[in-house]
Amino acid sequence: MSDPLGLIGSAGGMGQMPGGIGGSVQKPGVNGPDFKAVLMGNLKEVNALQQDATRAAEDLITGKRDDIEGVIAATDKADTAFKMLQAMRNQVMQAYDEVKQMRV
């Protein structure tokens, strides 16, 4: 899978998974960011990309810019980041449902 945003494998990226290929499993709180920090960082990044795409579209409509390719690229980048965030959310919800079904 290609990573057009550079989020997979980067420090604090959305696709960063402990114990991945060539990686090692880290204990929580040891030399790594916690889940909340990673999630909040990703939310802020997706929000910034969506704001950039909106600003680019508004600038195109008002005539402040004339490069439609740049607007399309910004919109696609924001769309891809949002879809990655939704996929992460769906995985978290699926994991929560599995934990919720466990008998103690």
Image (cartoon, rainbow, N blue to C red):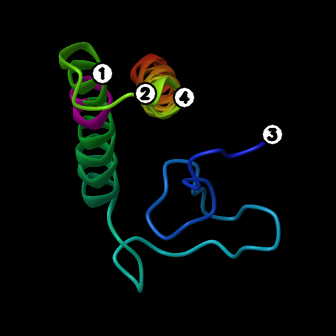
Note whether 61 is above or below 43 in the view shown.
above
Mark seen at residue 60: 1
Note whether 40 is above or below 100 in the view shown.
below
Amino acid carrying label 3: it is: Met
Q: Are marks 4 and 2 in contact (CB under 8 Å)?
A: yes
The mark nearer the N terminus, 4 or 1, is 1
Range shown magenta: 51-55
Q: Residue at x 32, y 29 (%)?
A: 53
Amino acid carrying label 2: it is: Val
User: Residue 80: x and y, percent?
Assistant: 53, 28
What residue sits right under mark 3 in the picture? 1
Q: Residues within 10 Å of mark 3 (few under 14, many from 20)?
A: few
Quadrant of the snapshot with the C terminus? top left
Q: Are marks 3 and 1 in contact (CB under 8 Å)?
A: no
Look at the numbered disc 4 and give the secondary structure of its residue.
Answer: helix
Look at the numbered disc 3 and give the secondary structure of its residue.
Answer: loop
What residue sits right under mark 2 in the picture? 71
Q: Are marks 2 and 1 in contact (CB under 8 Å)?
A: yes
The secondary structure that most of the magenta stretch takes on is helix
Q: Residue at x 22, y 30 (%)?
A: 64
